Amino acid sequence: MEKRHGKHIQEHEHDSFGMISISKVNSSGNQTIFGSDIKVRDYYQLEIKRAKLERDITDDKYWGVGQPIITLNLTERQLNELLLNRNCGEGIPCSIHYTETQGYIKDRPKLPTRKEALTELFSARLKDFHRSLEINSKEIKEVLGKNKLSKADKELVENTIYKVEQELTRNLPYITGTYLETLENVEAEAKSQILGLVQRLKEEGNLPAGSKSAIKKLMK
């Protein structure tokens, strides 16, 4: 849609016109961002609004119109992944803070951290494995108590040994490796948040004296 304000100003609006902005937020309390195991005070907010173009002889001016269509919250790590890892499948997790139809989204579920979830799943897996061993152990004892083993008995013993070997040499080491990788990711995210806080304190001139050496040791 085109509007004219006098002879030298044109205003254009259309449903496809939009403005996108990103700003850094310094909150007073800890915030939970979806997809992050670290509660943060400093995070980034991405906002998309409808827009209009105001054109005159000397310049084109772009203005946001009305309330945001959507507002998203991201940690610094999530923002970096979004900008650097293009074509990354489904995308990067974030928290939807506001939408045009829902308004501000306040009631967010409290999810267990990845570490807590893995610990619970790993514990359940070990309990299942233990129950399976108890059942198989009982069956094998009955088989070994026979004077002569049938073909089915031998297959039972072989399958049991295979299952135990598979669990101990492949499945459990894989789960353990995943758990350790999760811990490393949490540590990396925590360091990223600390570096962001340090940078903000430096910019504000509030970095305590003597803290630089301690921060360097922490970042190693």
Image (tube, grey):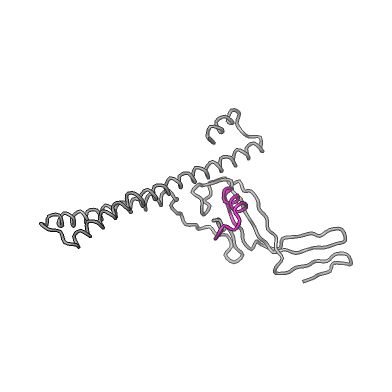
Tell which residue pokes out farthest to the right in this image: 7
| Residue at 59%, 57% in the rendered image | 72
Measured from the top left, where is residue 127 in percent x and y?
A: 29, 52
Measured from the top left, where is residue 76 in percent x and y?
A: 59, 48
Tell which residue pokes out farthest to the left in this image: 147
Compared across the picture, whether 205 is left or right of 218 comes to right
Q: Is residue 180 above or below residue 143?
A: above
| Residue at 63%, 39% in the rendered image | 199
Compared across the picture, whether 2 is left or right of 205 comes to right
Measured from the top left, where is residue 209 in percent x and y?
A: 61, 28
Q: Is residue 84 magenta?
A: yes
Between 123 and 173, which is closer to the camera in this rendering?
173
Q: Is residue 162 magenta?
A: no
In the picture, which quadrant includes the N terminus?
bottom right
Q: Is residue 136 above or below residue 76?
A: below
Measured from the top left, where is residue 168 in percent x and y?
A: 32, 49
Q: Which residues are magenta?
A: 72-89
| Residue at 55%, 60% in the rendered image | 89
Tell which residue pokes out farthest to the bottom in this image: 1
Q: Quarter-wise, where is residue 4 in the image?
A: bottom right
Compared across the picture, whether 51 is left or right of 148 comes to right
Between 69 and 177, which is closer to the camera in this rendering?
177
Is residue 131 visible in the rendered image? The answer is: no
Is residue 106 visible in the rendered image? The answer is: yes
How many marks can you see? Answer: 0
Compared across the picture, whether 160 is left or right of 217 comes to left
